[in-house]
Amino acid sequence: MNDWRQNLLNWYEANKRDLPWRNIKDPYKIWLSEVILQQTRVNQGWEYYLRFIKNYPTVSDLAAASEQDVLKLWQGLGYYSRARNLHAAAHTIVKEYEGKFPAKFESIRALKGVGDYTAGAIASIAFNLNYPAVDGNVMRVYSRLFGITTAIDSTNGKKQMNELAVELLPAKNPGTYNQAVMELGAMVCLPSNPQCESCPVQQACYAFLHKNMLDFPVKQGKTKVRNRYLNYIVIVQKDSILIRLRKSKDIWHGLHDFPVVETDRPITQAKFLKDKKWNEVVLLRNPVLKDVSEEYVHLLSHQKLFARFYLLEIVNGKMELPADSFWIKINDLENYAVPKLIDLYIRKKILK
Ligand code: SF4
C-alpha cells in the first residue's frame, strides 16, 4: 500500500491520542468504549468508560448487575437505550457464548444494540477481521476526500459509502486503518473547521483541491424536532417524595421521573394552577403549592422538551397513586436512575 492511506497510517502512529481504550484487544472493552462514545464527547465518555470497567471488569460482571444499577452508572450520558441494550447483550454473551465475546462478525452484529459500525469496529480492532467501521467521522472524511455528492443520510448514500469503505480497507491491520480514519475525522477533518493545512491526505483530497470542504458531507435534510410540554407534579409529604418508573415505550424507559401532565402546547403557570391540572393524573386533597420552577428546556435528538415542575406538599398521603409511581424517602432520591433533566431539577430544588 503506497498511497494516501500510507500517509494516513504514518500520521496516525505519530499523532493518535492516548485514550484508555487504545492499544487493547479485549472485545468487551472495545465494545464498551464504542457504545459509550456514540453521541458522547471523548472527555465525558472517558470518565464513564473507566467507571464501567471498574464496576464491571468483565462482560459476566456486567450481565450479573441489575438493570437499575447499570442505568444509574450510565446516568448523565443520555440515550439510555444504549445502556439497556448493553446490559441485554451482556446477558446474551453469558447465556449463549458462556461469557466469551463472540468472534464472528455476524454474531457480534446480532447482539442487541450493535449496528454495522460497532460490529465493524469490534471485529476489526479486537479480531483483526476485514470489516470497515463507518461512523459520522468516517463519512465526513470520505465524502470530502472523494467529493461524494450523494446524501450520506440517504439509503443510496449509505450503500455507496459502505462499498467505498470495503474497497479502501487494507488487508493488513484493518482495525488500525479504521481507527486512523476515525481519528482523522475527530482531530483534523473537523465538521466546520477542517485543518487541511496539517492534513496528511491533503494531496489526495477532492474537497481540498476544489476548496469546497464545507460543501461535504451532503445531507438530505434535518430530522424534524418535536416540541413537548411537560408539567411535572412533584409531591412531597414530610420526608417522602412520589416518583414513578417510566415503563412506556417513550423516552427514558426504565428511568424515574415524577407524575406528569403533558400538554400539546405551552400552558401558563396561572392557568395550570387555576385549573388544578394535576387532577388529571392524581387527585390531591388541599395540596400546598411550595414552588413553581422556571422552565427547563432540554434537547434530545428528535425532541425538544419544555418542562416546569410544580412542587406540592400534602398532609394526608392517602390517595390513589398514579400508574407506576411510589413513595421514597427524599434522602434516597440519589439512588434512583433519573434523566439529566430531572437530575438538574432535583439538585436545584429538592436536594439543595
Ligand atoms: Fe478533510 Fe481537509 Fe484533509 Fe480533505 S484535506 S480530508 S477536507 S482535513
Image: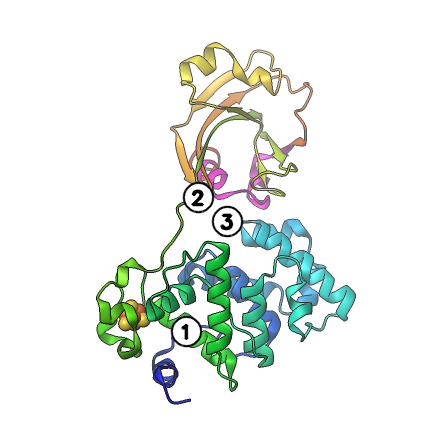
**Quick check: is 299 in the magenta stretch?**
no
Q: CA distance from mark 1 to mark 3?
A: 26 Å
Q: Position of residue 174 (x, y in %)?
A: 51, 80
| Label at residue 223 | 2
Q: Position of residue 164 (x, y in %)?
A: 46, 71
Q: Quadrant of the N terminus?
A: bottom left
Q: CA distance from mark 3 to mark 2?
A: 19 Å
Q: Position of residue 273 (x, y in %)?
A: 46, 14
Query: Which residue matches tag 3?
Result: 78
**Nearer the N terminus, badge 1 or badge 2?**
1
Query: Which residue matches tag 1?
Result: 181
Horizontal placement of 80 versus 205: left or right? right
Q: Is residue 192 visible?
A: no
Please tell me whether mark 1 or mark 3 is closer to you in this view.
Answer: 1
Q: Is residue 249 visible?
A: yes
Tell me the SS state at disc 2: loop
Residue at 24% across, 63% down: 212
**Nearer the N terminus, badge 3 or badge 2?**
3
Please tell me whether mark 3 or mark 2 is closer to you in this view.
Answer: 2
Q: Amino acid at mark 2?
A: Thr
Q: Residues within 10 Å of mark 2 (few under 14, many from 20)?
A: few
Q: Position of residue 57 (x, y in %)?
A: 62, 69
Quadrant of the image where one finds ligand 1: bottom left
Residue at 39% across, 47% down: 221
Based on the displayed image, in which of its 4 quarters is residue 62 positioned? bottom right
| Label at residue 229 | none
Foreground pick, 63 / 217: 217
Highlighted magenta segment, given as a residue range: 327-345
Q: Amino acid at mark 1?
A: Val
Q: Amino acid at mark 3?
A: Gly
Tell me the SS state at disc 1: helix
**Nearer the N terminus, badge 1 or badge 3?**
3
